[in-house]
Amino acid sequence: MDALSFIEQNLHIQDKAGQLVLLLFNPAQRRLYAEIERQQAAGRPVRIIILKARQVGFSTAVAALFYERSARRPNTNSMIVAHKADASANIFNKTKLFYETSPEAARPLKKASNTREMLFENPTKNSAEKQKDPGLRSKIRIETAGAKDAGRSATIHNLHLSELAFWPHADQALLSLMQ
């Protein structure tokens, strides 16, 4: 199943009325997804800068795509960095909601879920069982741009930099993250 089908069949969001509904990409989110697919098909790293109005749904779409990749592919590290702690938390809470509301068959093993990270790994303490089925060993991490060394010493496969124009020390943070 391709990423978009997985997202639209399994992941839920809270709509403006407070109801849980399946995440169905709107036209702008579909254009973003098509551009990601185009760059991947060309064999290039995906690099997209979005100048956008608020409430278009790009952060939700990116969070869903990162969740899909981390929850379905082994050894995949995703990171979301926003300008303020509450903005980071808002995006990360969407990720948690994806996990909590998706069908059980679509959920990977989960070792940890806290305010900063969701780790898809076998939670057992039994080393033989863990060796037999380690889980995906993938994770989604959230950071705030105020940390100048965000992402340092980590291998990041998917990186979402939200509201970059409002970051303090953007140049130093980018040096750390883009390594």
Image (tube, rainbow, N blue to C red):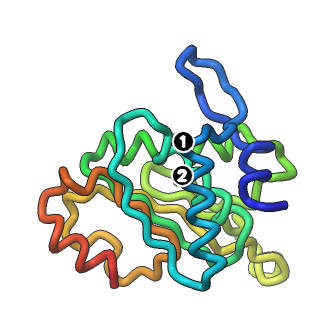
Whole-percent x and y of residue 113?
A: 56, 53
Which of the numbered marks, if any, corresponds to residue 38?
A: none
Quarter of image, res 98: top right
Q: Nearer the viewer, mark 1 or mark 2?
A: 2
Q: Say which element carries label 2.
A: helix
**Residue 60 position in % (x across, y down):** 52, 44
Instruction: Kindly identify the amino acid type of the residue bearing the numbered disc 1.
Output: Lys
Q: Nearer the viewer, residue 164 or 168?
A: 164
* Residue at the spot 29% in from the left edge and 69% down from the top edge: 150
Give the labeled residue for mark 2: 63
State the quadrant of the N terminus: bottom right
Kindly check if marks 1 and 2 are in contact, taking CB atoms under 8 A apart as contact: yes
Name which residue lies at 54% across and 72% down.
77
Crowding near pointer 1: few (<14 within 10 Å), some, many (20+)?
Answer: many
Residue located at (59% from left, 63% from top): 119
Considering only order in the chain, which callout, 2 or 1, is on the residue closer to the N terminus? 2
The residue carrying mark 1 is 94
User: Horizontally, is 177 left or right of 116 in the view?
Assistant: left
Eyeballing the image, is 134 above or below 34? below
Residue type at tag 2? Ala
